[in-house]
């Protein structure tokens, strides 16, 4: 698949163009310059064949000096990897010294380049496009990314300049498992993804809020394809300093909703905070598979007189106690910065995926529940008890490689199932079949129907 990168100075509409071409609002669009910092990649399917499109941070100015060097590095990587560049300029502002400097830089790179004159909202403004001819690019097109005007002209020009090849008959969107890496700011989410990819793929900084977009990054492990979603740190809404950060957190929360598996990253030196509990609650509410990563373990040291084993067990107990409603999620201890124990993470991802594909036979499940009821009968609710007449495990849709475990129970009255007894049944099932990282849901069928979850 061909790779095209969108480049330009800050605030010319690169992210709006990216969103328009890929057909989804992935990059954050805002009047504030320098909003996009990382490379953000998705697939455009508007033409005769799909191609990979990358949005980059603004080049040439320093609206945010803390990240200027990293943003430029990310853009340089995107330019080097691209088969074609879309050089975006602001048609309303005309040519600026930064545009001229960047044009010279792109010509020196020797890449095929299409000049995209943005913010041409109507036919009367088309004459503005010719003003940009002195930038030295033969191919230019006037568009309005905000209004979707003349998007087809960009696709036509891309197909004229670049041979996109045959249509891709690969995996449909949604077939590849999405793994969202979530957590509060500065716990090491981007460092973890960079370590997994063995690439400086996202910007890492000690400044909270460095990552702003939810960034989709393709990744393969042991022949399995995944999409890693690096997200902005989620913190309490009262602490959001700008409207951009509000949008970032909303994107992170949406990333949880569209993910198949969530990796909750926790700073080992700080443990489980209230914000971790809230993020875990979002994962639980969405019914997603989950893994907890205890990061920055290299900074931890057992106190004098305490063995490493006892110290480790104590930390794990703290995690389990703090995230008791996410107790089905296995904990992986590692150091992204030092790359310690890094292989354990995707070994655990593979384990969760394999268990998600396993089913308990109907006969085994019914015998298991009969034994559980015999050992500990359901409590009386009113003057009646719950009676489980029959049970079966539902199949997960084929496109959900980390689908939750759903059990359908035929009962006398769904309202007779208490929360505590539901948890008891869930624990009995996990003793028989571990189902690490997977929530167990009970769907009840009786005179009244409802769906419930056990941890």
Image (cartoon, rainbow, N blue to C red):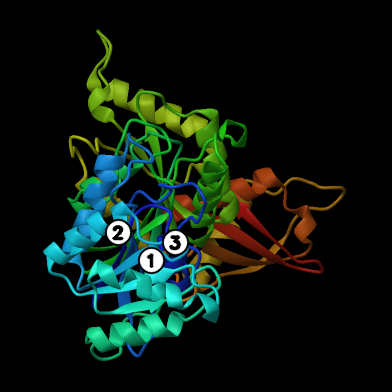
Residue sitting at x 25%, y 8%: 305
The residue singled out by tag 3 in the image is: 13
Q: Which residue is label 2 attached to?
A: 350
- Image quadrant assignment for residue 121: bottom right
Q: Is residue 423 left or right of residue 295?
A: right
Can residue 438 be seen in this snapshot? yes
| Nearer-N-terminus badge (1/2) | 1
**If you read the primary sequence from the N terminus, does the residue marked by circle 3 or circle 2 appear first?**
3
Residue drawn at x 82%, y 47% as measured from the top left: 381
Q: Which residue is mark 1?
A: 177
122 left or right of 379 in image: left
Which of the two labelled residues, at mark 1 and mark 3, occupies the earlier sequence position?
A: 3
Q: Residue at x 52, y 72 (%)?
A: 362
Is the residue under label 2 in contact with that under label 1 (CB below 8 Å)? no
Give the quadrant of residue 12. bottom left
Residue 256, x across and y down, in percent: 50, 54
Separation (CA) of disc 3 from disc 2: 40 Å
Relative to 45, residue 430 above or below:
above
Alpha carbon separation for disc pair 1 and 2: 11 Å
Q: Residue 123 at what x, y percent from top left?
A: 53, 81
Instruction: Looking at the picture, tell me which residue is in the foreground, 383 or 254.
Output: 254
Q: Nearer the viewer, residue 4 or 161?
A: 161
245 w.r.t. 429: above or below: above
Q: CA distance from mark 1 to mark 3?
A: 30 Å
Q: Residues within 10 Å of mark 3 (few under 14, many from 20)?
A: many
Q: Secondary structure at mark 3?
A: loop
Expressed as whole percent of the image width and height from the top left, the position of residue 310 reads 30, 21
């Amino acid at each position: 698949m061909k790779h095209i990168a969108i480049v330009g100075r800050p605030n010319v509409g690169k992210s709006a163009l990216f969103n328009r071409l890929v057909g989804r609002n992935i990059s954050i669009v805002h009047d504030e310059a320098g909003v996009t910092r990382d490379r953000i990649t998705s697939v455009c399917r508007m033409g005769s064949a799909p191609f990979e499109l990358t949005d980059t941070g603004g080049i040439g100015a320093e609206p945010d000096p803390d990240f200027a060097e990293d943003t430029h590095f990310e853009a340089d990587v995107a330019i080097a990897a691209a088969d074609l560049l879309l050089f975006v300029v602001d048609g309303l502002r005309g040519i600026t010294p930064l545009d001229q400097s960047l044009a010279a830089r792109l010509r020196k790179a020797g890449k095929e380049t299409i000049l995209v004159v943005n913010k041409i909202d109507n036919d009367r403004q088309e004459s503005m496009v010719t003003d940009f001819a002195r930038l030295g690019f033969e191919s230019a097109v006037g568009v309005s990314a905000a209004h979707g005007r003349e998007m087809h002209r960009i696709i036509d020009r891309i197909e004229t300049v670049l041979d996109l090849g045959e249509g891709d008959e690969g995996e449909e969107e949604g077939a590849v498992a999405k793994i969202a890496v979530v957590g509060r700011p500065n716990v090491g989410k981007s460092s973890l993804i960079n370590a997994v990819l063995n690439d400086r793929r996202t910007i890492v900084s000690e400044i909270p809020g460095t990552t702003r977009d939810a960034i989709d990054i393709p990744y393969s492990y042991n022949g399995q394809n995944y999409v890693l979603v690096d997200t902005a740190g989620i913190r309490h809404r009262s602490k959001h300093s700008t409207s951009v950060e509000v949008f970032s957190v909303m994107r992170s929360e949406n990333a949880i909703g569209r993910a198949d598996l969530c990796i909750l990253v926790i700073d080992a030196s700080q443990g489980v905070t209230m914000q971790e509990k809230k993020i875990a609650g979002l994962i639980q509410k969405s019914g997603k598979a989950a893994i907890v990563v205890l990061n920055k373990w290299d900074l931890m040291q057992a106190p004098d007189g305490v063995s490493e084993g006892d110290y480790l067990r104590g930390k794990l107990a703290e995690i389990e106690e703090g995230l008791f409603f996410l107790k089905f999620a296995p904990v992986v201890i590692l150091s992204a910065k030092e790359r310690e124990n890094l292989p354990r993470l995707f070994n655990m991802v593979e384990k969760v995926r394999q268990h998600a594909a396993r089913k308990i036979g109907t006969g085994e499940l019914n015998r298991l529940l009969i034994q559980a009821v015999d050992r500990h009968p359901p409590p009386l609710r009113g003057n009646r008890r719950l009676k489980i007449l029959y049970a079966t495990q539902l199949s997960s849709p084929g496109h959900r490689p980390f689908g939750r475990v759903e059990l359908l129970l035929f009962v006398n009255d769904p309202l007779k199932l208490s929360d505590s007894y539901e948890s008891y049944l869930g624990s009995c099932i996990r003793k028989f079949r571990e189902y690490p990282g997977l929530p167990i849901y009970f769907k009840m069928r009786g005179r009244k129907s409802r769906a419930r979850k056990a941890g």
